[in-house]
Image (cartoon, coloured by chain):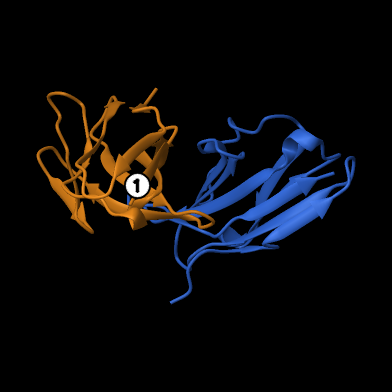
Chain colours: A blue, B orange
Amino acid sequence: GAGVSQSPSNKVTEKGKDVELRCDPISGHTALYWYRQSLGQGLEFLIYFQGNSAPDKSGLPSDRFSAERTGGSVSTLTIQRTQQEDSAVYLCASSSGRREQFFGPGTRLTVL
Amino acid sequence: GDSVTQMEGPVTLSEEAFLTINCTYTATGYPSLFWYVQYPGEGLQLLLKATKADDKGSNKGFEATYRKETTSFHLEKGSVQVSDSAVYFCALSDQNDMRFGAGTRLTVKP
């Protein structure tokens, strides 16, 4: 039974470059979430997908951030023109209904 | 909107001490409540949960009781171990949305 997987596990990029982070949720889970966790900080909600509904983008910090979920499964979080303050661990989680969320291991992004 | 407030850390305890991490919530509906744990260098994992009032979640010696009258879900453990050192997050889920507290860092010293 596969859990939530994310790739890459680590990404180092230069300021101003674009990055794509991938999340593969648990099969059959209709809800998918992206969070950001900066060093020593709590979880910052970014975006939430539920089935075929319009995503809740209320947590995206700027228009440089966007996310897609194709076919109700895999999701990609894109950060354009990265800044040093974007450095963080990006966590993906999936869930089924009101049940608990299952988290992936995260992608550690470092912007130089 | 729904929200979770948990005790600020960091918390430092000696091994075998009693642990309480306070968590209170605000919700318009009837949420499910959770505690997640994040061990150093790892992702979040569910520690325990409760889905309705007066339910008690328990796991690995940790317990938390869903108290509707005080809108609380405090985490307790009678005797902590060094291996319990981690960050603990309280969370609620209602209508497919989940809200997390800011996290409380626990360090247990031998």
In this rendering, the answer to whether B106 lies above or below A22 is: above
What amino acid type is highlighted by mark number 1?
Answer: Val
Farthest residue, direction bottom:
A1
Viewer-closest of B82 and B37: B82
Q: Is residue B84 visible?
A: yes
Q: Is residue B97 left or right of residue A56?
A: left
- Residue drawn at the location 48% of the way across and 65% of the way down: A26
Q: Position of residue B92 (x, y in %)?
A: 33, 38
- Residue drawn at the location 62% of the way across and 48% of the way down: A90
Q: Callout 1: residue from which chain?
A: B
Q: Is residue B93 visible?
A: no
In this rendering, the answer to whether B99 lies above or below A101 is: above
Dot 1 alpha-carbon crowd within 10 angstroms: few under 14, some 14 to 19, many 20 or more? some
Q: Position of residue A69 (x, y in %)?
A: 63, 54
Q: Is residue A4 left or right of residue A11?
A: left
User: Could you say which quadrant of the image residue B45 lies in?
Assistant: bottom left
Q: Which residue is mark 1?
A: B108
- Residue drawn at the location 13% of the way across and 46% of the way down: B56
Query: Which element carries disc 1, helix, strand or loop?
Result: strand
Farthest residue, direction front:
B110
Q: Position of residue A112 (x, y in %)?
A: 85, 44
In which quadrant will I find the N terminus of chain A?
bottom left
- Residue drawn at the location 15% of the way across and 29% of the way down: B68
User: Could you say which quadrant of the image residue B30 lies in?
Assistant: top left
Q: Position of residue A2 (x, y in %)?
A: 48, 74
Farthest residue, direction left:
B54
